[in-house]
Image (cartoon, grey):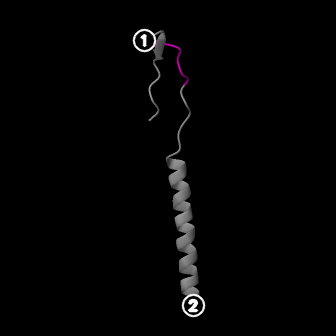
Amino acid sequence: MTSFWSWYITLLSLGTIAALVWLLLATRKGQRHESTEETVGHSYDGIEEYDNPLPK
């Protein structure tokens, strides 16, 4: 294999790894919001639903 192909494969591999690291860092979740102890106001069999939306 010539020197060109060795460098080409090396740079392509490092570029792919760098892009994957960037993708992981760009899409990671932020800090979680504190949950509240407020309920939505109704209960069923003594069970109350808390007013905590699902995470996005």
Disc 1: which residue: 44
Q: Residue 53 at what x, y percent from top left?
A: 44, 25
Q: Quadrant of the N terminus?
A: bottom right
Which amino acid, by three-letter code, is at mark 1?
Tyr
Judge whether 34 appears above or below 23 on screen. Answer: above
Judge whether 15 appears above or below 9 on screen. Answer: above
User: Range of the magenta residues?
Assistant: 34-40
Q: Residue 29 at what x, y percent from top left?
A: 53, 40
Residue at the extreme front of the image, as rendered: 45
At x 52%, y 66%, the residue is: 16
At x 42%, y 11%, the residue is: 44
Q: Nearer the viewer, residue 48 or 6?
A: 48
Q: Residue 45 at what x, y percent from top left?
A: 45, 10
Describe residue 50's horizontal placement relative to residue 7 as left or right: left
Q: How dense is the environment of label 1, judged by Cα within 10 Å: few (below 14), some, or many (20 and up)?
A: few
Disc 2: which residue: 2
> CA separation, marks 1 and 2?
73 Å
Which amino acid, by three-letter code, is at mark 2?
Thr
Residue 17, picture quadrant: bottom right
The verdict on residue 47 being magenta is no
